[in-house]
Amino acid sequence: MRAQPKASHFIDGDYVEDTDGTPFESVYSLTGETIARLHEATPAIIERAMAAAARAQKEWATWAPVARARVLHKAAEIIRERNQALSELETLDTAKPLQETLVADATSGADAIEWFSSIAATMGGSSVPLGGDFVYTVREPLGVCVGIGAWNYPMQIACWKSAPALACGNAMVFKPSEMTPLTALKLAEIYMEAGAPKGLFNVVQGMGRTGAALTTHAATAKVSLTGSVQTGANVFKAAAGGMRHVTMELGGKSPILVFDDADLENAISGAILGNFYSAGQICSNGTRVFVQEGIKDRFLERLAERAATIRMGDPMDPAIHMGPLISKAQHEKVMGYIETGRSEGARLVCGGHVPTIEGFADAPFVAATVFADVTDDMTIAREEIFGPVMSVLTFETEAEAVARANGTPFGLAAGVFTSDVTRAHRVAGALDAGITWINTYNLTPVEAPFGGVKESGFGRENGHAAIEFYSQLKTIHVGLTPVESPY
Ligand code: NAP
């Protein structure tokens, strides 16, 4: 097994195994090869991880801010030094092409940890004069934070959650998706090498029930989940029991609006990357592309030409743009949606089939697929597919496009392509989304807050906004005059 870690879990500064846990495998979907065998966390493992985190958090909270910052900065440096190895591991675990993992996974994680190292060093409270007495506020850590990850960006998710958590003085117990358990363990090693106290960042493996046990553990102060809306609802409800803090990064069915005055090639670049990057397995993808009626034919023609240049194949080959999906189960789900699109009357413009890739006949590839003549009520326009399937819809007026774009319970992201600067800002303001891009799509720099509205989530990752979700304010009122008591 070419990616077998030393043990399944990483607790209190070291690898830990408990073979009483249910065994599970990490499979490289390109070949069907088992790359690692692990065990789900037993209750004893969960207890050990939570106890280690609680202990480490108390120590970490006493460190000078600059010392905490130094650890995070060093961790970011180590990640960058090891980017090649981490990216290859991420490619094995997710089957995403190396061309992507080299630039979008560990590096994005390093950016987050580096950025939050500055926050660790500089975060402070405020003082409020009261004309005599005064109040000052202190930003305190929450305690032990639980991070629960999805399988599409395992390393990035582990970093995006742990960076603000640790910067604010918390400890973390992280559970990766059972499909992609490997890179979070490497991150745990790196934090230790960078000088973090043992137990500050722990990884426990398992399925949904492990996540559920962590969510309701007595020592858990906060849960940050990246996953589907259904899981989000379950976790939110369970966390509410102990009035625990939450961040919910959930699914989407995001719209991209292309007006007839847009730079067409640029809009197609946005739509194509916003649907086919990571084989479409991205929460914020713009899977409903609303194109203004007059430019529909030209848009579809160029889109099909450009989609035909996507190179599919072995994700370890740096020239390959698109690998297989994460698993056979995901493949079945996506092919099912393509069938539904056809049967409900959408017109297939390109893709829609399983391409034959020499040497990998059984791999779960799906060709980049574009449906035209999609209507708002079709299943493919309403449900998150999480695969390389783009729906193109047409519209006539701005008001109509905005109303239809907002006609979904999701609200993660949105895009608008136009050369009319006034319209760009007006539409961006009117779209129900946590993030809206103008004349670009799916850029998520760590400096900018990221998160959804409506059913797509609660809370924000990245940027200064994340601090609000990983710390709490204490207000301290200083009396400078004697207490006035009438009795
Ligand atoms: P998922 O099935 O919801 O699982 C997400 C994580 O939650 C996994 O680690 C899962 O464990 C765990 N889990 C499941 N049930 C749980 C419970 N009751 N309590 C605690 N944890 C539980 O999502 P996925 O299939 O991994 O990922 C795809 C979804 O994530 C899509 O909907 C996508 O849009 C969303 N996503 C959102 C963002 C964002 O930033 N907004 C980013 C990436 C992905 P196991 O799977 O190991 O059983």
Image (cartoon, rainbow, N blue to C red):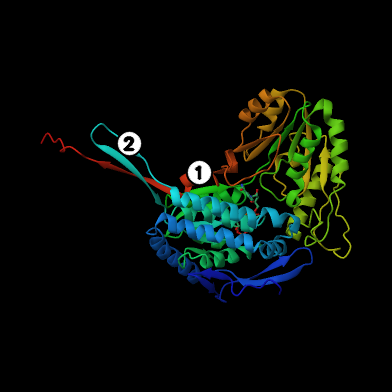
Residue at image location 68% in from the left, 43% down from the top: 442
- The amino acid beneath tag 1 is His
Quadrant that contains the N terminus: bottom right
Judged left or right of residue 290, residue 311 is right
Q: Is residue 184 visible?
A: yes
Q: Indicate the amino acid at tag 2.
A: Val
The number of discs equals 2
Q: Secondary structure at mark 2?
A: strand
Query: Disc 1, disc 2: CB below 8 Å?
Result: no
Q: Is mark 1 within 8 Å of ligand 1?
A: no
- Please name the residue that numbered disc 1 is placed on: 464
**Circle 1 SS class:** loop
Spatial separation of the CA atoms under disc 1 and disc 2: 21 Å
Which residue is nearer to you in this view: 364 or 125?
125
**Where is residue 345 drawn, in percent x and y?**
84, 38
Within 10 angstroms of label 1, few (less than 14), some, or many (20 or more) residues?
some
Q: Is residue 206 visible?
A: no
Residue behind mark 2: 128
